[in-house]
Image (spheres, rainbow, N blue to C red):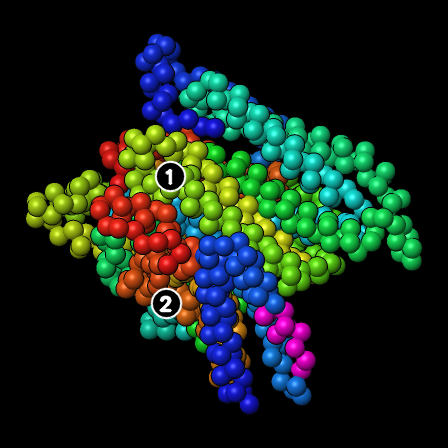
Amino acid sequence: MELGYLASTIVKMVALIAWIYGLLWGLGRKRLWQKAATLVLAFGVIQAVILAPKIGDFALFSAFDQGLLFQAITMTMVALGLNLIYGFNGQFSLAQWGFYGIGAYCSADITYRWTNGDASGLIVVGLGVILGALALMGVGKLLKIKRGVPVLSAFTFYLFALVAVGFIAVWLGQLLSPICAPLFGAPDAPGVLGSPIALQAVFFLSVIFAGAFAAEVSFLFGLPVLSLGSDYFGIATLGFAIVVKTLLVNSDTILGFKEMKGGRGMLGIPKLTTWAWAFIFLVIVIVIIRNFIRSSTGRATLAVREDEIAARAMGIDVAQNKLLAFVVGSFVAGIGGAIYAHYMGFLAPASFDFIAGFNPLIIVVFGGLGSMTGTIAAAFGWIFFLEGFLRILLGQLGTDAPSWRFVLYPITLLLLMLVRPQGLLGTVEWGFFKAEGLGATIKAAVGIKPKKAGE
Amino acid sequence: MPASTDTTKAKIAVKGRRGPPLAWVGWAFLILLAAVTLFYIGSKAWSNPILFLQNLLDGLKLGFVYALIALGYTMVYGIVKLINFAHGDVFMVGAFTSFYAVSRFGLHQWPLAVFPGMNPGLSIVIGSLTVVLLSMGVCVILAVTIERVAYKPLRDAPRIAALITAIGVSFFLEFFGALPFVFSGRFIPYKAPFPTTAWYIKDGIHPIVSGTASPDNTISFSNIFLIIAAASILVQILLQFIVKRTKIGVAMRAASYDKSTARLMGINVDQIISFTFAIGAAFAGLGGVLYAIAYSSIWTQLGILPGLKAFVAAVLGGIGSIPGAFVGALIMGQAESMTMSYISTPMRDAVAFTILIIVLLVKPTGLFGEPAQEKA
């Protein structure tokens, strides 16, 4: 029976890889209706499999598999963000897991308070994020007038602007949340804001705000730190991940959020992540990252990775470009964290330990630095193979055997670095991610007739 | 948005200004930060000088251990430009080696077993030294093996590939060590190979009777503190001597300055690199034993945070500089002990990395570092 289970797991993994390929291929079609049909079909297939009735003991897609699927989706988001920072922009960042944790806790706090009839989380974070973005843009505009302001001074201005905005947001939250409180209604007679539809809307907003919050934190952190050298940047980001975990462990004492319960873990987060939401956000993230890479900014990003001095000579503002990639990558990580929090319904700081933060890095390195397809395939393969398949397989050997997984990870990483440092897929891309525009331009420049787009 | 420094220079040339605009804002912010910190610590020290001095001593103890680890980081980085992440885990292996030698095999008692009539004090000294030497030896073998197997094939690869490999080695040591039949993943109480004695200072130095707490409002210290301080300072002097006076030290400095030219001068650079790893590992092993004795509990992830903080100390002092690593480590020890006492214990890690970021922004070469010749 166990062997049968393992065999079915392999079949599922192959089917999922085929599903990813199909999704990317379909999204890469030219016409809009083709893309729309692909999305509906890709969504429908998995939804049908999840809804399929159990036949006796055999479930086509068990609760365990669904758990793996949601983990794989969040891991895909985090890894795609990291690939943008490290793979495409060449900044070795270990802070991604910290932004993931920030996003998870931020959105969890919003919906937790909302389900307890308290709108202050949404108001404070929402207003803070929006005003914060405006403040950052305003300060940026002002600093542009005086060109050549040193990083440290710029950081000081941004820091004070954000702290001021934070105070304003908290004050507005205290002002507005009592007004909203009666609208929630009693538990037996829910008001306008207590309705399930409002909760879904709040969930959507909380995910977006969590991503934006992580992005603003990453802006403030990245501004001074990105000007360091490559491996100093790595160490500083590692420090960031450690500090975030430390703060989460002490979230109820140092930060003063009683409901986060510090190291004991945050309970009672509404489980709002459904397959539909996860799929929608996955597609949003894929489109954001792909369009970023394929834009002129994205090409500048690649240029910065290849040679900073040459890129500067081409008129690219290197510092700004690095910061932009870092912020977009962190935004995506925050969204991933929010999806994770509402799938688990429970958050423990231990899962945001910086050691776990090496997983997305290994995925990015494995899938290929600068290959979005590789990242997605590696994230799904990683979760389904190592967390699912290998855990079961090693579980057959003995009770201690599953801990061998953590010995096997670094060995695979070491072997990969020795044998194929560019990753398994290198820079190969499928369907939606294929850079036909750029490839065609280069081919035209060297005198090869470009293939028709979409072929 | 931060503009690049090149445009800054261009602007200066056009307008004839002396410095970049608004630079004073950043400096004012930093000075304000430093002033607030100093005022806070100063006021605390004024209100309770005894506690302040005790913190100073605790910080020194931590700093001396960090100094032992930081040497390995700074020397290896000076030569191969690699953040040797696995160094902290070599430190951990040193602690575990001495644990097995003492608690499982009773190696520290060998002089008494062989020569029953020996002076017990002398036998403890010889036994403990044997344990320390064994740990150092194991660490040296481990570090040289890591260097040969993992780092050497990647010497010409991009630096990030080597960094990822170092992280991989570090993880491998931690999680292999955490397997049930190796070290197990639990916290293990550590028994020192020699008896610890503590003293307190109040109108002269008095010993503390073991099992009782020191009296209130006194400064206490133990023989472990004295041993750590002595070992750390001795190692500094020894290393200064090796680097400045011996032939191999000259070769090390030459290799760190320019590897290919050093090779042309007939220096076996690979051997020098292995030797550097070996010296660093030996001191890390020594530090591991002392750390385990001082804090009397070990586990397989023991090395991560001390390792990172020692690296921060090396950067603070100027990476590649040996006295710099020592001074940086002492500063880190003080920062950590003051944070633990006056702010909150969990924030000790945050302070270390904040210091790193500020140092890199203000003076990227560190306190004692030479200006970088080239950016590789």
Tell me which residue sits at (47%, 69%) in the image.
A17
Q: Residue A94: image x %, image y %? A: 46, 50
Tell which tag, 2 or 1, sits nearer the viewer: 1
What chain does mark 1 sit on? A
- Give the label on residue B52, or none: none
Depicted A452 relative to depicted B22: above or below: below
**Quadrant in the picture for residue A271:** bottom right
Depicted B116 relative to depicted A5: above or below: above
In terms of secondary structure, where does tag 2 sit?
helix
Depicted A123 relative to depicted A79: above or below: above
Tell me which residue sits at (87%, 45%) in the image.
A183
Q: Please, what is the three-letter code of the amino acid marked with disc 2?
A: Ile
Q: Is residue A204 left or right of residue A219?
A: right
- Residue linked to disc 1: A300
Mark 2 on the same chain as mark 1: yes
What chain does mark 2 sit on? A
In terms of secondary structure, where does tag 1 sit?
helix
**Where is the N terminus of chain A found, in terms of image quarters?**
bottom right
Residue sitting nearer the eye, A30 or B21: A30
For the stretch drawn in magenta, what is the main secondary structure? helix
Range covered by the magenta-colored residues:
A45-54
Number of numbered labels in the structure image? 2
Magenta span includes A51: yes
- Report how far apart the C-alphas of labels 2 and 1 lie in the structure: 35 Å
Q: Pointer 2: residues within 10 angstroms few (<14), some, or many (20+)?
A: some
Q: Is residue A43 visible?
A: yes
**Where is the C terminus of chain A found, in terms of image quarters?**
bottom left
Q: Is residue B225 left or right of residue A166?
A: left
